[in-house]
Image (spheres, helix red, strand yellow):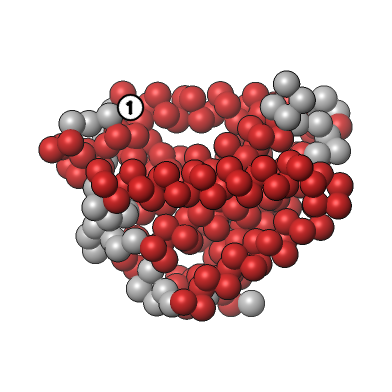
Amino acid sequence: MAGLAAGLSFFSTLNLGGDFEEITKNLYLMPLIGAIIGLIIGIPAYILSFAGLGFLVFLFYVAVEGINHIDGLADFFDAVFAPQQKKISALKDLNIGSGGSLAVASYSIFLVIFFGKISYNEILPAVVLSQTLAKQAMLLLVLRMDPLWDGMASEFGKNKSRRDYFSILISLAIGSPFILFWGEKVVVSFLVFLIITFFFERYVRVRFGGMSGDMLGALNCITFSSILGVWACWQL
């Protein structure tokens, strides 16, 4: 319970206490933490969508999850658009450049559209699954890569172990009940998660040689929005 409380406090704006050390000792709980955050967002999202106000879910999402991951998205894309010899310095720069501004604006617009398009009877499973797999993607990056420097990423993964791969079974267990009603969408969601995680890891390994906290935040945002996009665009 201490790991869950600490994880929810760290990955959202909820203040449930807990020591950061508890997160690093229980990394395998990350997809479960994502599912709980998804429920907290998804239940009001269902009400808003039922009332035809799905586009307002974005505001509630930001209120619950905060902007730490979005900040990581901005810093990462500043580095993506920087020349190869300046990528690391761009990643460390605290100022937001054009690449980061474009990424945040695009991310916000896409989420508003996706939240508005997902039907009220699917918004809850879509958000829960998206949050679950977003946190799972972050964890896989932590488990498979070394940090670029001493910072959040290194602190986050200092106690990682093979046991944390058990998290994949937790993600599958969370997604399994949804297969009964939304089978194809769930399967495609897992495939999208795997593809994004694979290519993201490959890109940062080649271009940067390691991971950072900003990369974890960026991967969270990219995975979350992409899986929501699957559900929003399914009927197109």
Comparing 222 with 182, the one in front is: 182
* Position of 209 relative to 108 (above/below): below
Q: Residue at the spot x=25%, y=43% of the render?
A: 207
Measured as percent of width and height from the top left, residue 161 is found at: 43, 77
Q: Amino acid at mark 1?
A: Gly
Q: Residues within 10 Å of mark 1 (few under 14, many from 20)?
A: some
Measured as percent of width and height from the top left, residue 85 is found at: 13, 38
Left or right side of 135 for 1: right
Left or right side of 230 for 158: left
- Image quadrant containing the C terminus: top right
Comparing 123 with 202, the one in front is: 202
Q: Residue at the spot x=51%, y=45% of the render?
A: 195
Number of marks in picture: 1
Local SS, label 1:
helix
Task: Give the residue at mark 1.
Answer: 99
* Position of 227 relative to 209 (above/below): above
Left or right side of 181 for 7: left
* Position of 43 relative to 28 (above/below): above
Measured as percent of width and height from the top left, residue 4 is found at: 60, 70
Comparing 95 with 16, the one in front is: 95
Q: Is residue 19 visible?
A: no
